[in-house]
Image (cartoon, grey):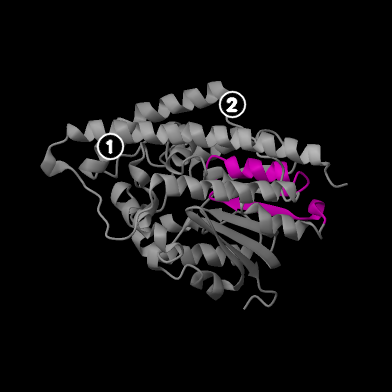
């Protein structure tokens, strides 16, 4: 039954209040972060400062916030269309947000120190074997991906960077899955979130599609432990520690897979390995949905931001990603592109596993 006008107004008001507060909270953290960094950098000798420069166009903060609002209007339309439920924060309310903000700001001086020292091999955490490319302080992040501390501040770091819009960008991956499930029975299908991180998106999938069997795969023991805590106890869900290029799944055993903010952090040859592995585990006709950074030319008015990003954060494979044919590994592995669209600073690409596998 279609919602009444009052119900529609109520839904929009709740959405606007929650998402407006979210953008305001993380937007304020972004401003405070910039001020703190500026003060800290004044204490660094001029010759030791690493300055980021670009000749490409850089949007103003007002233009970025305007684009965030466009994304949230799309997000609201998806909720109204029944593609997924009203978003929930899920981070422990105000007390949890304050606690995470404190951890984030306490850690910020170390990030600034590593940035200007260009120090990106200060790792801590478990000693299990990992690929060499993985053993770095991506983003100049404390402990890289290897500690509980890193896992507990990661979502705040990302939301602050994206002005509170990171979760909304991720949610756009739900759309093609929801459209596919509209004509299929969830109970006989399965989903895997590859490189699931802290489990935030896996929790969103579980809320949106409660009868779907789901799995998160994450290479970091610390992040996988955090993901299990995030998703909680739920039938037919789990989190496994494994490499994205060697998934713990049988051939053709899953129907949907997402890879979110992974490919820009992979060397080119590993991107091809991961695409082939996705093709192995996804059943013919199944979907792989990739959400990742924009590339040069996707939004020419944002190209300057993309140019600045690897100068400000340790992203060793990002410059290659910006100019790479990111769809080519999927095509070679047996996928066909079904949809491409941008979502603020991200783009969403939907691939379908070709029935013939060729």
Dot 1 crowding, Cα within 10 Å, few <14, some 14–19, many 20+: many
82 falls in the magenta region: no
Quick one: 116 or 276, which is closer to the camera?
Answer: 116
Rendering coords of residue 25 (x, y %): 49, 31
Point out the stretch of residues depicted in magenta. Answer: 185-213
Where residue 348 sits in the image (x, y, percent)? Answer: 56, 59
x then y, percent, for residue 197:
52, 44
Q: Residue at x 66, y 74 (%)?
A: 354
**Residue 217 visible to an observer of this rendering:** no
Identify the image quadrant of the C terminus. Answer: bottom right
Residue holding disc 2: 92
Q: Mark 2 falls on what kind of element?
A: loop
The structure residue drawn at horizontal position 28% and vertical position 34%, both measured from the top left corner, is: 37
Q: Position of residue 90 (x, y in %)?
A: 61, 32
Q: Pointer 1: what residue?
A: 112
Q: Disc 2 or 1, which lies upstream in sequence?
A: 2
Secondary structure of the residue carrying tag 1 is helix
Q: Residue at x 45, y 71 (%)?
A: 325
Asked where in the image residue 229 lies, by quadrant, the reply is top right
Name the residue at 79% across, 52% down: 186
């Amino acid at each position: 039954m279609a919602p009444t006008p009052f119900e529609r107004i109520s839904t929009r008001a709740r959405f606007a209040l929650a998402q407006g507060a979210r953008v305001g909270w993380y937007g304020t953290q972004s401003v405070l972060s910039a001020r703190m960094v500026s003060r800290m950098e004044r204490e660094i000798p001029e010759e030791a400062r690493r300055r980021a420069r670009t000749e490409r166009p850089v949007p103003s903060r007002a233009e970025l916030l305007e684009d965030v609002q466009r994304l949230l209007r799309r997000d609201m339309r998806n909720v109204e269309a029944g593609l997924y439920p009203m978003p929930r924060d899920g981070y422990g309310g105000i007390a949890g947000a304050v606690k995470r903000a404190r951890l984030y700001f306490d850690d910020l001086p170390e990030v600034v120190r590593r940035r200007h020292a260009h120090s990106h091999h200060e790792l801590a955490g478990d000693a299990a074997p990992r690929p060499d490319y993985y053993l770095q302080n991506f983003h100049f992040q404390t402990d890289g991906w290897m500690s509980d501390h890193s896992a507990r501040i990661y979502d705040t770091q990302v939301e602050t960077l994206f002005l509170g819009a990171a979760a909304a960008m991720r949610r756009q991956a739900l759309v093609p899955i929801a459209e596919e499930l509209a004509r299929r029975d969830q109970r006989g299908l399965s989903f895997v979130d590859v490189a699931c991180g802290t489990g935030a998106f896996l929790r969103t999938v579980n809320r949106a599609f409660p009868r779907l069997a789901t799995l998160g795969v994450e290479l970091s023991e610390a992040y996988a432990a955090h993901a299990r805590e995030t998703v909680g106890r739920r039938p037919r869900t789990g989190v496994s520690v494994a490499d994205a290029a060697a998934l713990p799944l049988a051939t053709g055993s899953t129907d949907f897979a997402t890879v979110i903010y992974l490919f820009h952090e992979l060397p080119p040859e590993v991107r091809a390995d991961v695409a082939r592995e996705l093709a192995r585990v996804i059943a013919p006709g199944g979907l792989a949905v990739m959400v990742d950074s924009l590339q040069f030319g996707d939004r020419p008015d944002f190209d300057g931001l993309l140019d600045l990003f690897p100068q400000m954060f340790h992203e060793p494979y990002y410059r290659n990603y910006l100019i790479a044919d990111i769809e080519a590994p999927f095509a070679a592995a047996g996928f066909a592109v079904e949809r491409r669209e941008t979502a603020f600073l991200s783009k969403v690409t939907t691939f379908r596993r070709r029935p013939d596998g060729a």
